[in-house]
């Protein structure tokens, strides 16, 4: 029988409060042949500090200073070809950056290959990753972590481990996202560098064709693969840049949101800072996490529209929402539809339109006002404000934001119908109508390829016979609608709503 430490009694503090170490197992870790601790740490004068011969795995965690509940978390898997771990610059330093940004960070010191130490080493790293996830879930309330929002980061061989862990069924818990930094992804011959030791360490000198496929995560990407943030340099000779390209191309092919950051120079193992280009990828990573709803503001009260979200939560306490509702969510065109329940009698509609929200706001609060209701149908109106912001974002960015929101909903509510109401032709925003039409077209094409999803086109019905915007449908601000505008929406939307 496996035995694990009761973590509350076996925490080993290594600094005042920010950093603590948790042993993954009590006694001999499963798969070890002996109880011997063979670990060695080296700090060369020139080179990266590394730890090797790891036979007793641990989890070192850094929690943000603030006490906000429901924050996300990331497990960091350092690199080292499964032979050693660059655990300082490729682990602890990164964890500190995440904690400073309000994200709980856990550095996994997983077991490395040691001759004669294990029953079957190829299963050991994933086993340790799975155990790390179990520990975080078990202590989520204590550490104030949203268990639906735990991601994996890996560098080099750690990137291979993180990508493997994101394959559904490889570990016992759902992975929200991955962040792969100069990763060794593929074990295919064409993408394996002669300089890389990762495949050889895990599978030996002569892996079979089936083993190469099994341990090549890019070949297992599907619509259920979590979103990914991927970083690599073109001149990486240890992990060929084709690893990141192949993984990203697989994400695109399956319409999984992702971000690919390719440096021209930087080589391999640059950790946080690419000295060759004087660039840091962490700000891009944090921004990407916020865009995709994986990072909440350090103070919830300071986040945009938080007061409205909090009011929804209080309202739900007083009047519990119906089971399996139809959820309307998005910006003020829904928020101002105050008689929506009278417009659709007999339909269990919950209206959660808020403020002048943009898609990133809806993404941010998806785990607050979408997922908890477990709706049978989600109807979204959002994107118009995105196009009208001073940032002048292109239509393609709105489409990508919608795809991200769609993926979050689909992964958490696989049976729910997801409908998007087309961005309307608001006269005050005549200047952006080219982008509105472009965004509507692309989102419509995307939804045509998705099961149980619809594009609800209200745009054309709000134009006159000459193709001009019908100003009589709008209030004086020429943005929000009068009752006759909502009457058009009602007629078009009714056939799509589920009883």
Image (tube, rainbow, N blue to C red):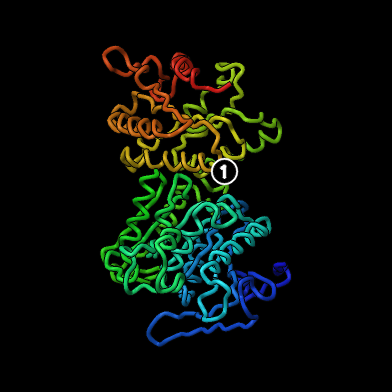
In the picture as drawn, the residue positioned furthest to the top comes out as: 465
Quarter where residue 236 is shown = bottom left
The correct choice, above or below, for 24 with respect to 40 in the image is above
Q: Name the residue under label 1.
A: 367
Q: Can residue 181 be seen in this view?
A: no
Q: Which residue is drawn at 41% across and 62% down?
A: 212
Report which quarter residue 455 is drawn in.
Answer: top left
Q: Up-down: is 390 above or below 425? A: below
Point 36% across, 62% down: residue: 188
Pick whichever, 440 or 436, lies toward us: 440
Q: Which of 340 and 477 is in front in this view?
A: 340
Note whether 88 is above or below 310 in the view shown: below
Does residue 241 appear left or right of residue 448 in this picture?
A: left
Residue 86 seen in this snapshot: yes
Mark 1, secondary structure of its residue: helix
Residue at the (51%, 69%) spot, across then down: 122
Counting every numbered tag in the picture gives 1
| Disc 1 crowd, CA 10 A, few/some/many (<14, 14-19, 20+) | many
Q: Position of residue 405 (x, y in %)?
A: 46, 40
Taking depth in this image into account, of 62 and 481 the one nearest to the observer is 62
Expressed as whole percent of the image width and height from the top left, the position of residue 474 reads 41, 19
Quick one: quadrant of the N terminus? Answer: bottom right
Q: In this view, does 421 lie to the left or right of 33?
A: left
The location of residue 291, given as percent across then percent down, is 44, 48
């Amino acid at each position: 029988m496996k035995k694990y430490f009761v973590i509350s009694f076996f925490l080993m503090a290594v600094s005042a409060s920010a950093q603590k170490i948790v042993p993954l197992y009590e006694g001999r870790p499963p798969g070890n042949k002996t109880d011997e601790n063979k670990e060695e740490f080296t700090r060369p004068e020139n080179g990266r500090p590394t730890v090797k011969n790891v036979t007793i795995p641990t989890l070192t965690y850094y929690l943000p200073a603030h006490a906000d509940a429901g924050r996300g978390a990331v497990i960091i898997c350092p690199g080292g070809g499964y032979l050693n771990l660059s655990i300082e610059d490729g682990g602890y330093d990164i964890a500190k950056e995440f904690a400073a940004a309000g994200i709980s960070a856990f550095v996994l010191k997983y077991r490395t290959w040691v001759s004669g130490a294990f029953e079957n080493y190829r299963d050991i790293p994933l086993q340790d990753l799975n155990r790390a996830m179990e520990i975080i879930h078990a202590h989520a309330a204590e550490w104030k972590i949203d268990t639906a929002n735990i991601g994996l980061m890996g560098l080099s061989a750690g990137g291979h481990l993180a990508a493997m862990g994101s394959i559904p069924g490889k570990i016992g818990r759902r992975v929200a996202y991955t962040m792969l930094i100069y990763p060794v992804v593929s074990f295919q011959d064409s993408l394996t560098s002669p300089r890389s030791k990762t495949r050889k360490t895990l599978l030996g000198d002569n892996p079979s064709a089936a083993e190469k496929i099994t341990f090549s995560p890019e070949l297992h990407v599907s619509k259920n693969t979590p979103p990914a943030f991927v970083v690599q340099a073109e001149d990486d000779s240890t992990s060929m840049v084709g690893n990141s390209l192949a993984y990203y191309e697989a994400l695109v092919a399956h319409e999984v949101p992702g971000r690919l950051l390719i440096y021209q120079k930087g080589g391999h193992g640059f950790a946080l800072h690419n000295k060759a280009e004087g660039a840091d990828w962490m700000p891009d990573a944090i921004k990407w996490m916020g865009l995709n709803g994986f990072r909440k503001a350090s103070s919830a009260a300071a986040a945009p529209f938080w007061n409205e979200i909090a009011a929804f939560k209080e309202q739900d306490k007083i009047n519990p929402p119906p089971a399996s509702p139809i959820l309307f969510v998005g910006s003020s065109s829904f928020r101002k539809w105050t008689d929506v329940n009278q417009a659709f009698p007999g339909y269990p509609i919950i209206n959660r339109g808020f403020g002048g929200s943009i898609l990133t706001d809806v993404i941010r609060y998806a785990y607050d006002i979408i997922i908890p209701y477990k709706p049978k149908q989600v109807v979204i109106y959002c994107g118009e404000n995105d196009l009208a912001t001073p940032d002048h974002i292109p239509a393609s960015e709105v489409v990508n934001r919608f795809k991200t929101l769609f993926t979050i909903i689909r992964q958490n509510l696989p049976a729910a119908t997801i409908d998007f109401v087309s961005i309307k032709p608001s006269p005050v925003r005549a200047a952006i109508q080219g982008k509105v039409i472009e965004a509507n077209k692309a989102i419509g094409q995307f939804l045509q390829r998705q099961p149980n999803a619809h594009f609800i086109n209200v745009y054309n019905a709000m134009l006159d016979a000459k193709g001009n915007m019908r100003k009589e449908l709008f209030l004086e601000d020429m943005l929000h609608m009068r009752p006759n505008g909502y009457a058009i929406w009602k007629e078009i939307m009714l056939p799509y709503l589920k009883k």
